[in-house]
Image (spheres, rainbow, N blue to C red):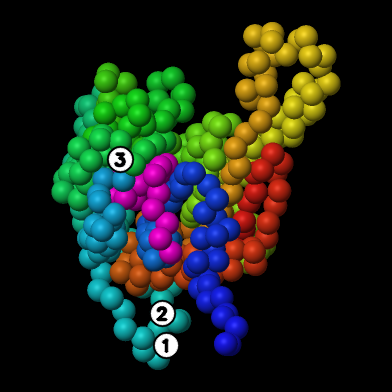
């Protein structure tokens, strides 16, 4: 009788073995305007791999994508993401390849960005008429160049807020209080989420107006921290696979012209907090490990002390695997890439995100793996 062979596992199945050891699956989405199409592509690749998040945290455009995911049933999420990104990129047609297109693409993108600045983006925002300089001080019209009421209508059409508030998927949205300067996370475990909370997370001044919630006014959470990773990782008991999708790259080449100078400065500005967050997590885990070592040296009679028990509770944490994806796709949109919503750019970014996560899920161990201590590992493509 011939020996039976074990069926060879698919790449996605091998990835599932590596990443499936965790109890929770969390998606963390950075802010970045038009670059958020990359996150939609990543989500398409994750869905194909069977990754269904039970917690989504986002800031700015990441909050919009997060609401579209958490606010729809799994079978409808990709459809709703596509509906949103098709809508906001509908002002420009899909480009067909032709000779010389590579040379023309930067100029076409510049025209697209100029259109977004002049006429707004369908389903997202429109310019204020008259401009804010002519509005009375203290009025909402005096506080931004654009009106985001079209976004409210889009969210109410594409997002089921009753589903979000049912708690089927946890949702966290980063914002900042305009008057106190304090960062805040609107979370469906503590708040009843509606379109206002999503809009507050994406209210980047001076383009967009602050959003009022319960008598307080909020701006885009990216002003304080563009990546909501620390909010997710601060719970030491969590046992999770976290997929973090960043839209700005902290590393890059030395600029060669003024356009690249402006782009590089924007990348660093919006990515710097992520580096701070990773360093902070590393420091916390080092302290957690040191605390565990010190507590192990205590005589047995001290173990029942209430304060010692509190320290023991935070001296250990559950395993955490962080798959870190960074959008490094050059759409030739220079420093205006976060408001360049052409159909060609959105399509490129979506495809780039889908391909990047497929690469990770096909061979997770091909990533650069960093051990931050106490079972916390990062996988960087």
Lateral position of residue 284 relative to residue 49, left or right: right
Q: Any mark on residue 100, and which?
A: 1
| Rendered view: 278 above or below 347 | above
**Camera-side residue: 41 or 226?**
41
**Magenta-highlighted residues:** 49-69
- Residue labelled with disc 3: 168
SS label for mark 1: loop
Q: Quadrant of the N terminus?
A: bottom right
* Residue 107 lies in the magenta stretch: no
Residue at image position (69%, 35%) is 285
Assess whether mark 2 and mark 3 are in contact (beta carbons under 8 angstroms): no
Across and down, in percent, residue 41 comes to 40, 64
| Disc 2 element | helix
Earlier sequence position, callout 1 versus callout 3 = 1
User: Crowding at label 2, few (<14), some or many (≥20) Cα neighbours within 10 Å?
Assistant: few
Quarter of the view holding residue 82: bottom left
13, above or below 129, in the image: below
Q: How many marks?
A: 3
Where 81 falls versus 298 (above or below)? below
Label whose residue precedes the other's in the sequence (3 or 2): 2
Q: Residues within 10 Å of mark 3 (few under 14, many from 20)?
A: some
Question: Disc 1 and disc 2: Cα gap in Å?
Answer: 6 Å
**Closer to the camera in the image, 222 or 233:** 233
Q: Residue at x 83, y 21 (%)?
A: 297
Asked whether 167 or 111 is in front, the reply is: 167
Q: CA distance from mark 3 to mark 2?
A: 46 Å
- Which residue in the protein does label 2 denote? 104
């Amino acid at each position: 009788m011939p020996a039976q062979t074990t069926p060879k596992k698919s790449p996605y199945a091998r990835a599932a073995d590596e990443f499936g050891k965790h109890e929770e699956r969390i998606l963390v989405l950075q802010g970045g305007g038009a670059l958020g199409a990359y996150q939609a592509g990543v989500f398409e690749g994750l869905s194909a791999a069977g990754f269904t998040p039970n917690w989504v945290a986002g800031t700015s455009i990441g909050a919009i994508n997060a609401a579209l995911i958490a606010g729809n049933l799994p079978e409808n999420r990709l459809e709703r993401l596509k509906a949103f990104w098709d809508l906001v990129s509908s002002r420009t047609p899909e480009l067909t390849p032709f000779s010389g297109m590579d040379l023309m693409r930067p100029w076409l993108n510049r025209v697209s960005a100029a259109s977004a600045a002049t006429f707004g983006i369908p389903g997202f925002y429109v310019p204020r008429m008259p401009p804010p300089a002519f509005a009375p001080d203290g009025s909402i019209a005096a506080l931004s160049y654009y009106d985001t009421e079209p976004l409210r209508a889009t969210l109410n059409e594409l997002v089921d807020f009753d589903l979000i508030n049912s708690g089927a998927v946890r949702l966290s949205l980063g914002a900042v209080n305009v008057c106190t300067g304090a960062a805040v996370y609107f979370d469906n475990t503590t708040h009843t989420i509606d379109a206002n909370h999503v809009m507050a997370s994406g209210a980047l001044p001076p383009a967009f107006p602050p959003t009022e919630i319960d008598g307080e006014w909020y701006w885009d959470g990216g002003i304080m921290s563009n990546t909501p990773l620390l909010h997710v990782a601060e719970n030491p008991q969590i046992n999770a696979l976290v997929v973090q999708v960043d839209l700005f790259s902290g590393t890059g080449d030395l600029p060669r012209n003024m356009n690249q100078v402006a782009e590089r400065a924007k990348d660093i500005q919006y990515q710097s907090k992520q580096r701070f967050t990773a360093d902070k997590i590393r420091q916390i885990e080092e302290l957690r490990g040191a605390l565990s070592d010190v507590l192990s040296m205590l005589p047995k009679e001290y173990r029942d002390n209430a304060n010692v028990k509190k320290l023991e509770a935070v001296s250990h944490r559950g395993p955490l695997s962080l798959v870190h994806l960074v959008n490094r796709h050059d759409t030739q949109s220079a420093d205006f890439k976060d408001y360049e919503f052409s159909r060609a750019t959105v399509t490129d970014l979506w495809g780039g995100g889908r391909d990047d996560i497929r690469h990770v899920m096909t061979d997770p161990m091909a990533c650069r793996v960093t051990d931050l201590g106490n079972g916390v590992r990062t996988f960087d493509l």
